C-alpha cells in the first residue's frame, strides 16, 4: 500500500517523470478533488484564477542551460496539466523573464498562462524602458499583470501603470513587498490608489497580514498574490523528520507542502499563492494543494497550533 504522507522529495520520485499519467494515478487517487483546481475571482473583473501558481525567483534564473531549461519546461507542463495559470517574475530575477518567455513561446502554450511581472527601478523613463524590456523578454503583446516591485518609486510608476491599463497594454496593475514591516505601507497605497492586485508574504508561521492588511484588502476589493509561502524553505526544515498528523487526510493533504499551501489558500481573501520551484515533482505537489477539501477556520487554527508546538 502506498504511503500518502509524502515529503517533498518522496512525492512522485519518478524516473525523469516518464509515464507520468500512470505514476500520478495512485497519488491523485488519494484526493477527493473536483475536475478543476479551486479558482477565485479577481474582484475587479470576476475573472477566475486557479489558487496555486508559480514564482520564478532564483528557480528560473538559469540562462541558456539546456538541461535546466528542459526541466523547467516540464515544470510548466505539469503546472498546465493540473490547472495552474499564474507565472510571476521580475527584472530583479536575473534571466527569469527571458526563460519564461522562451519556454512558453517555443512550447506552444504561451496563451495558457496568466503572466505577471514587475517594474523595479526609479524614474518614469527608466520604468517605461524596463517594462518594455519585460514585454520583449516574456514575448507578450499585453501583460496580464504589471506590479511595482517592493514599492520602488511607486508614486511615479502608478501613473504609468494606470495609463497603460487604459491603453490596454496591461490588463491589471499591482504593488508588491515581502516583509511584515511593509504591510502598513501596502495598506496606505491600497487605500489611496486602489490597485487591482497586491502581493505580499503570508504563511502559517508568518501571519502579520491578518492584523489589518487582509481587512484593507476586503474593503477595497483587491486581488491577492502570496509570496514566501514556505518562508524560504524554513518551514520544511522545521518539520524535517516529522509525520503529518492523521487528521489532515480529511482535507486531502498528503504532504507538508500541501499542508502549508492549504493553510494559505483556505483563506478566502487569497486569490493565488505563488511557490517557486524548478523541480517537476514539486510543481505537481504544489498544484495538488489547489484540489480537494479546504480547511475551515477552526481547522486552520488547529494546523497553526500543530506547527507552533512541534
Image (cartoon, rainbow, N blue to C red):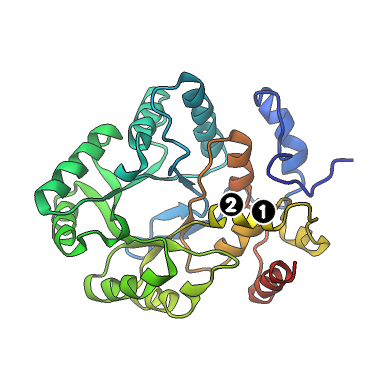
Above or below, 8 relative to 109: below
**In contact (CB < 8 Å): disc 2 and disc 1:** yes
Residue where numbered disc 1 is placed? 237
Which mark is drawn over residue 136?
none
Q: Residue furthest top?
A: 66
Where residue 228 sits in the image (x, y, percent)? 50, 56
Where residue 176 sits in the image (x, y, percent)? 34, 60
In the image, what residue occupies the spot 45% across and 46% down?
Answer: 55
Q: Quadrant of the C terminus?
A: bottom right
| Label 1: element kind | helix
Q: Quadrant of residue 297?
A: bottom right
Instruction: Say which of 157 and 273 sits in front.
Output: 157
Q: Quadrant of residue 152?
A: bottom left
Crowding at dot 2, Cα within 10 Å, few <14 / some 14-19 / many 20+, comes out as: few
| Label 2: element kind | helix
Which mark is drawn over residue 233?
2
Where residue 40 sits in the image (x, y, percent)? 47, 60
Q: Is there any visible trace of residue 292 in the rendered image?
A: no
In the image, what residue occupies the spot 42% across and 65% down?
Answer: 179
In the image, what residue occupies the spot 57% across and 55% down?
Answer: 230
In the image, what residue occupies the spot 37% across and 44% down?
Answer: 89
Crowding at dot 1, Cα within 10 Å, few <14 / some 14-19 / many 20+, comes out as: few
Q: Quadrant of the N terminus?
A: top right
Where residue 70 sits in the image (x, y, percent)? 50, 23
Q: CA distance from mark 2 to mark 1?
A: 7 Å
Q: Quadrant of residue 239?
A: bottom right
User: Is 145 on the left-hand or right-hand side of 53?
Assistant: left
Q: Residue furthest right?
A: 1
Instruction: Say which of 221 and 117 sits in front.
Output: 117
Amino acid at each position: 500500500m502506498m504511503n500518502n504522507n509524502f515529503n517533498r522529495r518522496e512525492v512522485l520520485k519518478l524516473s525523469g517523470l516518464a509515464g507520468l499519467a500512470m505514476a500520478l494515478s495512485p497519488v491523485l487517487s488519494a484526493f477527493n478533488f473536483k475536475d478543476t483546481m479551486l479558482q477565485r475571482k479577481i474582484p475587479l473583473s470576476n475573472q477566475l484564477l486557479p489558487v496555486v501558481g508559480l514564482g520564478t525567483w532564483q528557480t528560473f534564473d538559469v540562462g541558456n542551460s539546456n538541461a535546466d531549461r528542459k526541466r523547467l519546461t516540464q515544470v510548466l507542463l505539469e503546472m498546465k496539466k493540473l490547472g495552474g495559470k499564474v507565472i510571476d517574475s521580475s527584472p530583479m530575477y536575473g534571466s527569469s523573464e527571458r526563460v519564461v518567455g522562451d519556454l512558453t513561446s517555443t512550447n506552444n502554450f504561451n496563451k495558457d498562462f496568466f503572466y505577471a511581472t514587475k517594474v523595479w527601478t526609479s524614474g518614469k523613463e527608466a520604468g517605461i524602458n524596463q517594462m518594455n524590456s519585460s514585454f520583449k523578454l516574456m514575448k507578450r503583446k499585453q501583460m496580464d499583470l504589471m506590479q511595482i516591485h517592493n514599492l520602488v518609486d511607486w508614486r511615479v510608476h502608478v501613473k504609468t501603470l494606470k495609463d497603460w491599463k487604459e491603453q490596454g497594454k496591461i490588463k491589471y496593475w499591482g504593488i508588491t513587498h515581502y516583509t511584515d514591516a511593509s504591510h502598513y505601507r501596502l495598506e496606505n497605497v491600497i487605500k489611496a490608489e486602489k490597485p487591482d492586485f497586491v502581493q505580499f508574504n503570508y504563511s502559517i508561521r508568518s501571519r502579520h497580514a491578518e492584523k489589518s492588511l487582509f481587512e484593507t484588502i476586503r474593503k477595497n476589493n483587491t486581488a491577492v498574490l502570496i509570496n514566501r509561502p514556505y518562508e524560504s524553505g524554513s518551514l520544511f526544515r522545521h518539520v524535517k523528520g516529522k509525520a503529518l498528523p492523521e487528521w489532515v487526510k480529511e482535507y486531502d493533504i498528503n504532504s507538508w507542502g500541501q499542508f502549508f499551501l492549504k493553510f494559505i489558500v483556505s483563506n478566502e481573501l487569497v486569490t493565488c499563492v505563488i511557490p517557486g520551484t524548478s523541480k517537476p515533482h514539486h510543481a505537481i505537489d504544489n498544484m495538488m494543494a489547489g484540489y480537494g477539501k479546504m480547511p475551515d477556520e477552526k481547522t486552520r487554527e488547529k494546523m497553526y497550533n500543530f506547527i507552533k508546538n512541534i
